[in-house]
Image (cartoon, rainbow, N blue to C red):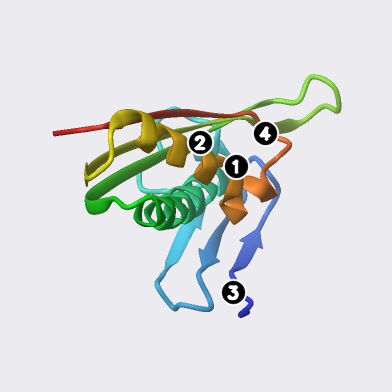
Amino acid sequence: MPTRSARTAWNGDLMSGSGQVELSSSGAGTFDVNFPKRAADEADGTTSPEELVAGAHSACYAMSLSNLLAEAGGTIHSLDVTADVTLGPDKEAGGFRLTGITLTARGEIEGLDDAAFKDAAEKAKAGCPISKALTGVEITLDAALEG
């Protein structure tokens, strides 16, 4: 299996410094990062490690869920997956940590009822590689069929 890479070039200290994250493997882009905007409610065009984790988790989870739904006999018309990743203080070790992730999954699936959808959604939460990598973070799930 392949290895994917990203690179960050950083200048300055934590509070006044800034950097750029480059998605090296794909060449998909370079994105600005800095701590004040990372810790602020509004990102104002600057990404953060948490947003990058959210993107990775939502994509990985959607892939896992689509596979499980198809294996269960469902026809997938659409899936919409959001991952909300929260940064907060690490009360035990000091500094910061990821304090929670909320996955929200909505799907238009033919051939499966809500219970089967929710079962597949729970299995995808436990089985997607990014969920497995984030086992130290509480992951909650809100999954429902639409339409």
Secondary structure beneath label 4: loop
| Left or right placement of residue 13 versus residue 22 in this view | right
Q: Foreground mark, 2 or 3?
A: 2
Q: Amino acid at mark 4?
A: Val
Residue found 45% across the figure and 61% down from its top: 31
Q: Which residue is mark 2?
A: 122
Q: CA distance from mark 4 to mark 1?
A: 12 Å
Q: Which residue is mark 4?
A: 137
- Asked if the residue under mark 1 is in contact with the one under mark 4, i.e. CB atoms within 8 Å, the reply is no
Q: CA distance from mark 4 to mark 2?
A: 16 Å
Which sits earlier in the primary sequence, circle 1 or circle 3? 3
Q: Amino acid at mark 1?
A: Ala
- Asked if the residue under mark 2 is in contact with the one under mark 4, i.e. CB atoms within 8 Å, the reply is no
Q: Amino acid at mark 2?
A: Glu
- Asked if the residue under mark 3 is in contact with the one under mark 1, i.e. CB atoms within 8 Å, the reply is no
Q: Position of residue 107 (x, y in %)?
A: 26, 41
Residue found 44% across the figure and 41% down from its top: 120
- Asked if the residue under mark 1 is in contact with the one under mark 2, i.e. CB atoms within 8 Å, the reply is yes
Q: Which mark is residue 4?
A: 3
